[in-house]
């Protein structure tokens, strides 16, 4: 189902700013949250900056295990993404409740999400800005792409459940990687 | 032309992941670069993380002056954005060459860009990750929005000049800010 994606191409998935899901696993229990505060930091090995609020249940799991998966949902998952974002793993088994399928990752204990068109296995690379800003720098160890979800349209959060969906793709002459 | 935008609403502009322009001014000379590696870090006062490569001419200006403007272009500026990204301020007076209009900011010396639909005046708030990752944490001091560019469509870089343009806006019931 999932194909290996070269690490050098990971930035093309995150740089456009899609809403993503972040999974963690701690003491045998998996959890998932919605996240829009992320950016690329380096091409290869791919480094990703992200903010996981200390109010989020995932924060303690990410800090303790130093592992997570960033899963990228396409438009058809938008209603589930919003539901994931509107409750906490403190109260809810989100994978079960929202019908998301955890799949084993190769390099980390946090699960992939089978329904997402891309999954990035990550470990924590730098925690210097965690205490002040909840800002983690992650390294992507392994990347997966679902070849059956070609040209997946992603969603971009504008606040309070309003999302811009990817529209037209344009191509301009550029030497910028 | 530009209206004041409450700082509490800045995140709604950057969270969706648009390509932005970043201006600096040093020794009386303004420069501008294209940037996609940015994310929100805090709602209010708005903090923004961004990566400005040490290979970019803007890096030294940002590090020395600790000031910049993040200007958000709409789709009609896409050809200029790509041109800005494909040359360096070392060689080119980009504002003049590409017909971008610098406008005075209120809190920083870096210029606003009159053609952009939003402009965020920023100062450096944290430089701990600059040496290792070129990662700056900026604080937005003042935000401007052009009310004549309503529902501006932004562009999202997928690499090598391919951009997704904002398409349909969807609204799902959510309590997530």
Image: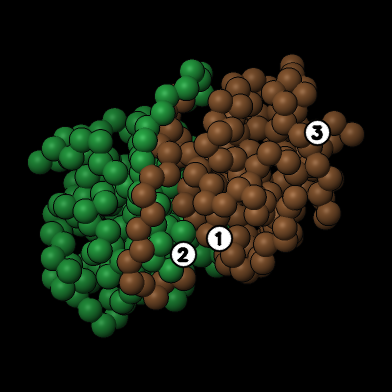
Chain colours: A brown, B green
Q: In which quadrant of the rendered image does the N terminus of chain B lie?
A: top left
Judge from the rendering whether residue B148 lies leftward or rightward of residue B163; answer left or right.
left
The residue that mark 3 highlights is A30
Q: Residue at x 48, y 18 (%)?
A: B173
At mark 1, the secondary structure is helix
Of labels 3 and 1, earlier in sequence is: 1
Q: Residue furthest bottom?
A: B91
Judge from the rendering whether residue B39 lies leftward or rightward of residue A142; answer left or right.
left
At mark 3, the secondary structure is strand
State the image coordinates of residue B2 (x, y, percent, origin top left): 15, 40
State the image coordinates of residue A7 (x, y, percent, origin top left): 66, 65
The residue that mark 1 highlights is A11
The residue that mark 2 highlights is B159
State the image coordinates of residue A78 (x, y, percent, origin top left): 54, 31
The reply to the same-chain question for discs 2 and 1 is no
Task: Say above or below: B58 vs B137.
Answer: below
Q: Residues within 10 Å of mark 1 (few under 14, many from 20)?
A: many
> Residue B14 or A75: which is nearer the viewer?
A75
Judge from the rendering whether residue A61 lies leftward or rightward of residue B25; answer left or right.
right
Q: Residue at x 19, y 75 (%)?
A: B93
At mark 2, the secondary structure is loop
The chain letter for the residue carrying disc 3 is A
């Amino acid at each position: 189902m999932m194909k290996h994606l070269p690490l050098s191409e990971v930035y093309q998935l995150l740089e456009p700013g899609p809403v993503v899901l972040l999974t963690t696993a701690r003491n045998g229990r998996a959890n998932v949250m919605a996240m829009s505060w992320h950016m690329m930091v380096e091409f290869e090995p791919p480094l990703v900056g992200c903010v996981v609020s200390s109010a989020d249940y995932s924060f303690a799991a990410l800090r303790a295990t130093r592992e997570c998966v960033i899963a990228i949902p396409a438009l058809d998952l938008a209603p589930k993404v919003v539901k994931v974002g509107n409750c906490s793993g403190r109260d809810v088994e989100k994978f079960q409740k929202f019908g998301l399928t955890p799949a084993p990752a190769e390099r980390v204990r946090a699960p992939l999400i089978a329904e997402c068109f891309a999954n990035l296995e990550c470990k924590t690379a730098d925690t210097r800005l965690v205490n002040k800003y909840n800002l983690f720098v992650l390294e992507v160890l392994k990347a997966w792409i679902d070849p059956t979800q070609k040209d997946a349209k992603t969603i971009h959060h504008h606040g309070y459940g309003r999302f811009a969906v990817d529209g037209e793709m344009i191509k301009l002459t550029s030497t910028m990687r």
